[in-house]
Image (cartoon, grey):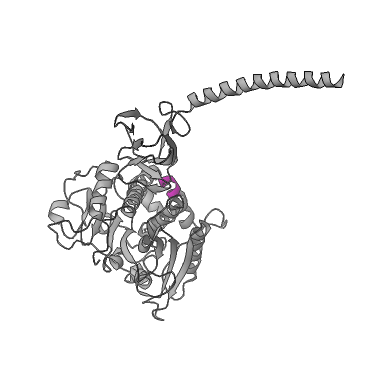
Amino acid sequence: MQTSSIKGVFLVLIMFTATLSGCFGEQTKETDEEFPDFQINFSPPNNAVLNTGEWNEFLLVGEGRAISVPNNVLLFIDDTLIPNGYAMVEGNQMNGKLLPTPYAENVRITIVENNGKGESFDMELANGTPIISGAEWFEKMDFITSVCSDSSQCGGYINRWMGSPNPAFERAASFFHGHFEGLGYETNIMRVTDTFSITEPESLNVIAWKRGKDNSCVQGMGAHMDVAIPGGPPGGGTYEGAYDNTAGTVAIMLYAKAFVDIEVQCDTFLALWSSEEEGLRGSNAFANNDCDYCLPQDKELRFYINMDMMGISYPAKKANGDPFPYHAWSGPDIDPDVQDVAITTILDYVHRDVLNAPMDMRIEGEYGAGCEQHWDDHYNLVMDVHEDTFGRSDHVTFRNLGAQTIFHLGAYDEDYSAYHSPLDTFDNMIAEVGGQEELEKSIQFVMWAALIEFMIADQTPEIRNVNV
């Protein structure tokens, strides 16, 4: 009696299991059809939406197959940029990320098969949340420059004159230090006492390090966080220093956030310098002192990108309708008649081919200030992007050590009347360019240019110290 019951139950279970097995088998087959061997954001490419400015994940299955992307899309494998935008599957599958610029249009992605034939997909684009955005920059600028009683709403990190001592500068440096440290960087405050004279101040830098795959080389980005001292020329000094150089300071803070998700080839420093206004004393202290977080003397210094006075530049316009000038100068420019350094090629490629900047746009008249080597060709050129000897900021420290450099800045001197004056405020920046939206567009453009320059230069072996 019990044996018969057990047999009956067993037969029922077999039949039930077989039914379930059939159902599961059909589900697996349908799943395979829904998710093909090329996916973007977990969707078939014909149904996928590519979000501009932000990370998009992709999967490509099949050894020997390859993906090719256009110039306006950055291709990452294992969080490392592939500069030529072409990668082949090694093994069974490849997982990666796509980063279309916020300015990407008409994106066509091609999958190349083993036999050399390809299939192209014209992607649907949507505005994403850029990993570097003018909106986030604006919000942080407003927080840093605003003064109020609620410290959660405004920081009031102004009056950042480098002196001995200046509590306002110390407080701001501590805030900036906490930003990098909170993102996981090896971060230090570097102090060098040069003199006890307030007119020749000491140096206090914030240095954040990200370790690279190759510990024999080093590279970096930076901006000076100090502002022109009261009474300083030509405008009498300032207290917010919004344009010169809170703008560049905030840019470096945002780069630190973006670089968390990027692997770099060489050890990389992100730095906020002091005493730039007093003779590049902060960057020189970092470059020429021996400490655990100073510039290593036994590693090749490949390149450095400098951010100083940014945002009042193309595509923003002056009151007369002319666009503000946009400057990006590479160096060293040893011979004005020839290209001296490989980073110049990257500078031109990023603006011309990736961002599609108007390289030949000119105004009627001339700009108040411009390049040193090529004034005859560039005096009325909006996109002043080329090799030049122009100095006046911290890139000179590293250029003097043989590094290839890029220096970004916008309007200055005659093109920006608030230069080094109490009028250099965040509110004045907004007014100069015609409103918040215009300022966000202008700063976002130059920040993306420098971001892409850095990522390509990081993966370009031809970028070498000129003294090597």
Report x, y in % for residue 234. 29, 66
Which residue appears farthest toward the right when viewing the image?
A: 1
- Vertical placement of residue 128 versus 242, above or below: above
- The answer to whether any part of residue 325 appears in the image is no
Position of the C terminus, as image quadrant, is bottom left
Q: Examine the image and state in which quarter residue 297 appears.
A: bottom left
> Closer to the camera, 375 or 43?
43
Figure disc tally = 0
> Closer to the camera, 428 or 335?
335
Question: Image point 39% across, 49% down: which residue?
Answer: 80
Question: Image point 32% across, 64% down: which residue?
Answer: 301
- The answer to whether any part of residue 90 appears in the image is yes
Q: Which residues are magenta?
A: 132-138
- Vertical placement of residue 176 versus 117, above or below: below
Position of the N terminus, as image quadrant, is top right
> Closer to the camera, 171 or 336?
336
Q: In terms of secondary structure, what is the magenta stretch mainly?
A: helix
Q: Is residue 395 left or right of residue 436?
A: left
Report x, y in % for residue 259. 43, 52
Report x, y in % for residue 75. 37, 42
Q: Examine the image and state in which quarter residue 233 appears.
A: bottom left
Q: Is residue 228 magenta?
A: no
